[in-house]
Image (cartoon, rainbow, N blue to C red):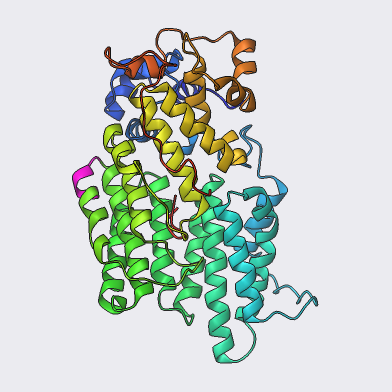
């Protein structure tokens, strides 16, 4: 079971030599919020609050939210799989290049298929499998980029850029933003020398996301908007160019929202959505469609503390066929969070049950998902059907072991208006995408 948010907050605050009052002043957060978190009277906090606390502590957001799937949380050095990924991204300095493997002769077509399959693993949240195979994919791409005719080398460099971009995305998911930025810098170098004119702005989108994870919101906005302007100037008559531009626009909007400029973010999200061109599905191009824009607007509303807006946007949503599985998982988590913020235990439970069906492994390792189930479990009356989910996430056993119960001040009871029904009673909450197959665009999350 992961460390409680309040325990992490107290540990990081003491490591920084800060009192609760000093942290509250530096973060611009109420000292009562910090006290409630550290006393475990609150199991979670809204994302803008977490961003503010991480900024006040001088740490990355992942230090508060916990490690993504596959990341050790015990402070030990990188496991062998991460060492292999580092060596693939950053080969040994001043050493001769490795000898060709002598295996099956690589062609650009085979390499593209290999990279596309790796992206599919990423969107299916199969991070454990991906970290095993990605070093080999990057090595294959680096070899292909250095052999053949000029055209073949240019195509190989495009493949290398995409493989390193994926290395950057996976590193972010694994909580290694330093490695991510190193991978993305090398990806950009390969992309600039490649045959794909849209690859550099796609990688710029990934860089903006890495900056968001480091809470460098102004840098993320500058990078995304600069790349979007170049795409609009040079490739706006191309349908794929509009998709890449859309991903960059959404990335900038997310940074605006995290910087407490929700109106600007919402405006940016809505731009040009009504005139989207029809394009062929492409797993390695930013997903920008009416569905993806609406999902991102749900996310922005939740992050900015507007749960009613989020549920209204999610109501009746039908996801397009090119929506990646990872977008569906984030949508369900955002819907669950919105119901929780409104005090609707039944709505939150339904969304969490759907999330378990869609992405069980991802859910077990996501701190916010576990925290929401903890809040539901600590209610005086559990919502009907909660026990299987609590047992799946080990919440029930952990609560019995620790004796931690918050019968009065849980997240649900805290946010539930007096006129709302008690937890466990039907409130007619809206939950999106329960029957949909399994966020985030390929190049921005």
Q: Position of residue 173 (x, y in %)?
A: 53, 47
* Left or right position of 122 against 406: right
- Quarter of the rendering containing residue 221: bottom left
Q: Can residue 258 be seen in this view?
A: no
Q: Position of residue 250 (x, y in %)?
A: 32, 55
Using the image as rendered, state which of residue 170 and residue 237 is in the foreground.
Answer: 237
* Left or right position of 370 against 292: right
264 inside magenta stretch? yes
Q: Residue furthest right?
A: 102
- The vertical placement of 303 against 6, above or below, is below
Q: Is residue 42 visible?
A: yes
- The vertical placement of 113 against 383, above or below, is below
- The vertical placement of 327 against 417, above or below, is below
Q: Position of residue 382 (x, y in %)?
A: 50, 14
For the point 32% across and 34% down, the residue is 48
For the point 62% across and 40% down, the residue is 361
First to last magenta residue range? 260-265
């Amino acid at each position: 079971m992961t460390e409680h948010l309040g325990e992490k907050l107290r540990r990081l605050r003491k490591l920084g030599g800060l009192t609760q009052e000093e942290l509250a002043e530096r973060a611009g957060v109420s000292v009562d919020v910090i006290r409630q978190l550290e006393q475990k009277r609150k199991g979670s906090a809204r994302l803008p609050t977490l961003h503010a606390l991480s900024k006040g502590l001088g740490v990355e957001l992942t230090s508060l939210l916990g490690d993504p799937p596959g990341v050790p949380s015990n402070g030990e050095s990188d496991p062998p799989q991460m060492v292999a990924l580092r060596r693939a991204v950053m080969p040994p300095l001043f050493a001769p290049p490795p000898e060709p493997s002598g295996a099956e002769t690589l062609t650009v077509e085979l390499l593209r298929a290999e990279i596309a399959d790796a992206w599919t693993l990423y969107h299916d949240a199969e991070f454990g499998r991906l970290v095993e195979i990605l070093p080999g994919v990057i090595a294959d791409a680096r070899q292909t980029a250095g052999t053949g005719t000029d055209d073949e080398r240019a195509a190989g460099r495009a493949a290398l850029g995409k493989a390193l971009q994926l290395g950057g995305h996976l590193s972010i998911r694994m909580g290694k933003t330093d490695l991510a930025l190193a991978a993305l810098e090398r990806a950009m170098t390969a992309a600039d020398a490649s045959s794909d004119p849209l690859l550099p702005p796609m990688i710029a989108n990934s860089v903006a996301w890495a900056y968001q994870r480091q809470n460098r919101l102004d840098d993320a906005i500058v990078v995304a908007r600069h790349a979007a302007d170049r795409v609009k100037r040079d490739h706006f008559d191309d349908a794929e160019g509009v998709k890449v531009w859309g991903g960059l626009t959404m990335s900038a909007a997310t940074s605006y929202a995290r910087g407490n400029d929700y109106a600007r973010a919402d405006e940016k999200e809505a731009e040009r959505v009504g005139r989207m061109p029809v394009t062929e599905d492409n797993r390695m191009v930013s997903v920008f469609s009416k569905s993806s824009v609406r999902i991102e607007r749900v996310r922005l509303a939740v992050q900015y503390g507007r749960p009613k807006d989020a549920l209204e946007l999610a109501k009746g949503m039908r996801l397009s066929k090119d929506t990646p599985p990872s977008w569906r998982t984030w949508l369900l988590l955002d819907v669950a969070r919105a119901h929780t913020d409104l005090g609707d235990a039944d709505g939150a439970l339904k969304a969490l049950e759907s999330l378990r069906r869609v992405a069980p492994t991802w859910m077990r390792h996501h701190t916010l998902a576990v925290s929401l189930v903890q809040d539901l479990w600590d209610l005086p009356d559990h919502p009907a059907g909660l026990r299987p989910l609590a047992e799946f996430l080990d919440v029930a056993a952990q609560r019995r072991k620790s004796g931690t119960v918050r019968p009065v001040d849980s997240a649900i009871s805290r946010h539930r208006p007096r006129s709302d029904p008690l937890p466990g009673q039907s409130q007619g909450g809206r939950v999106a995408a329960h029957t949909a197959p399994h966020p985030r665009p390929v190049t921005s999350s």
